[in-house]
Structure formats: C-alpha cells, structure tokens
Image (tube, rainbow, N blue to C red):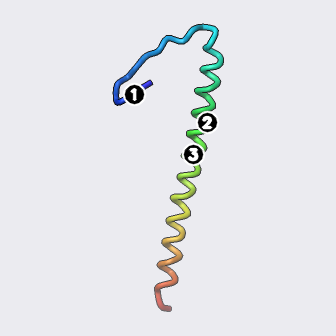
Amino acid sequence: MAAKGQRQVERIPRDWVEEVERRVSAGREFQDTVREVLAANAQLLVLAREQRKKRRKPD
C-alpha cells in the first residue's frame, strides 16, 4: 500500500487473509471495469470528433 508517495506495509492476521484477498480481488475487478468504461468513452469522443469533421466538410 502507498500513502502520500510512501510505501507502507501492514501485517494482516491469518484469520483475515481470505476476507482481505476477496476485497482486493473485488477492488481490482472494479478498477478493470472503470478502465473499460474510460476506454469506451475515449473511443466515443474520437468517433464524435470524426463525425463533426465530416459534417463540416462541404461535398
């Protein structure tokens, strides 16, 4: 874990390990999903820009 640019290490009791692993996994899945949404939004912005360019060009 990092806080304010400094790495920190926390000891986790053995009986917490499964729960912490589950939460870490869920957090990673969430981050992956957010990345996918951001990538899709970026693609939509590119497509919208291309459409605007096509509309402005006289035939």
Badge 2 marks a residue whose secondary structure is helix
Can you say whether 16 is above or below 2 in the image? above
Q: Residues within 10 Å of mark 3 (few under 14, many from 20)?
A: few
Which residue appears farthest toward the bottom when viewing the image?
59
State left or right for residue 26 relative to residue 7: right
Q: Residue at x 53, y 53 (%)?
A: 39
- Give the image location of residue 19, x and y in percent: 65, 19
Whether tag 1 and tag 3 are in contact, CB under 8 A, the answer is no
Q: Amino acid at mark 1?
A: Ala
Query: Residue 34: which disc?
Result: 3
Q: Amino acid at mark 3?
A: Val
Q: Which residue is mark 1?
A: 3
Figure check: 6 above or below 56: above
3 sits to left or right of 16: left
Looking at the rendered structure, the secondary structure element under dot 3 is helix
Which of the two discs, 1 and 2, sits closer to the camera? 1
Residue at figure coordinates x 50%, y 91% from the top left: 59
Q: Where, by quadrant of the figure, is residue 8 drawn?
A: top left
Measure the C-alpha gap from mark 1 to mark 2.
Answer: 21 Å
Q: Are marks 1 and 2 in contact (CB under 8 Å)?
A: no
For the residues marked 3 and 2, what is the alpha-carbon distance in whole angstroms?
A: 9 Å
Identified by mark 2, the residue type is Glu
Give the residue pinned by disc 2: 29
Q: Earlier in the sequence, mark 1 or mark 2?
A: 1
Q: Position of residue 13 (x, y in %)?
A: 57, 8
Whichever of callouts 3 and 2 sits on the residue coming sooner in the sequence is: 2
Tell me whether circle 3 and circle 2 mark residues in contact (CB < 8 Å). no
Looking at the rendered image, the disc whose residue lies closer to the viewer, 1 or 3, is: 1
Write the residue at 64% across / 24% down.
Answer: 22
Q: How far is mark 1 from mark 3, CA to CA?
A: 22 Å
Q: Is residue 15 left or right of residue 54?
A: right
